[in-house]
Amino acid sequence: MKSWFIKFKPFILITTFVVITVPIVFYTLKDYSFKPITINNILSKLSPAGNLTGTWFGRATFKNADNPDFYCSFPGNVTLTLTQKGNKLNGQFVFAEEKGIPSNDDVACEEGTDSFQISAIVNGSRIEPFNIANDYGTFTGSFTSDTLILNQSKVITFELVGSINLIRQ
């Protein structure tokens, strides 16, 4: 009789442990909802890598994207005045155009200054897509403590030639 008990003692102990432990674990987890791990879930939890509040200055060139044969290229100064609260970014985008460069003699270019309000979301060291008025399209950005780079992700009327590299003032 003793040998039977000794042979099955580990089995009895393991079975008892499983019968008691498994229901406790499932009861504890029954109200816990698991969210799938996606890149958006991760990015939405990132705090900004820095504060972009302040004035940023750089240069850019935009050209009319309406007609590839007849357009003006406008080099000019870009000034961003930004205020950041948490992950929300608001401010003003000012593009002071210099003398336009026509694609040919049949095009007349007029310079001027454009100013628009912007608002965007900051995730880590990136700026999520945001619009600069209806004519300038959609932009994304990345930044360090003293450099901000904007790239155009969607062209409407004015196409950005290259990137806008801005320095904190």
Image (cartoon, helix red, strand yellow):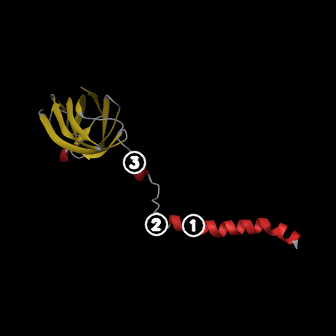
Q: Residue flagged by tag 2: what amino acid is it?
A: Asp
**Residue closest to the far top:** 169
Q: Residue flagged by tag 1: what amino acid is it?
A: Ile
User: Is 137 left, or right, of 116 in this rendering?
Assistant: right
- Contact (Cβ within 8 Å) of mark 1 with mark 2: no
Residue 149 pos. (x, y %) = 32, 34
Q: Quadrant of the C terminus?
A: top left
Which mark sits nearer the N-terminus, 1 or 2?
A: 1
Crowd band around label 2 with a 10 angstrom C-alpha radius: few (<14), some (14–19), many (20+):
few
- Contact (Cβ within 8 Å) of mark 2 with mark 3: no
Crowd band around label 3 with a 10 angstrom C-alpha radius: few (<14), some (14–19), many (20+):
few
Residue 21 pos. (x, y %) = 62, 65
Residue at left 76%, top 67%? Answer: 11
Secondary element under disc 1, as helix, strand or loop, is helix
Residue 91 pos. (x, y %) = 19, 39
- Contact (Cβ within 8 Å) of mark 1 with mark 3: no
> What residue did someone put label 2 on?
31
> What residue did someone put label 1 on?
24
> What residue did someone put label 3 on?
43
Residue 62 pos. (x, y %) = 23, 36
Of the two numbered discs 2 and 3 in the rendering, the one whose residue sits closer to the viewer: 2
* Quadrant in the rendering for residue 56: top left
User: Is 108 left, or right, of 64 in this rendering?
Assistant: left
**Compared to 135, does 62 lie above or below?**
above
Nearer to me, 126 or 164: 126
Q: Residue flagged by tag 3: what amino acid is it?
A: Leu
**Residue closest to the far front:** 2
Residue at left 40%, top 52%? Answer: 40
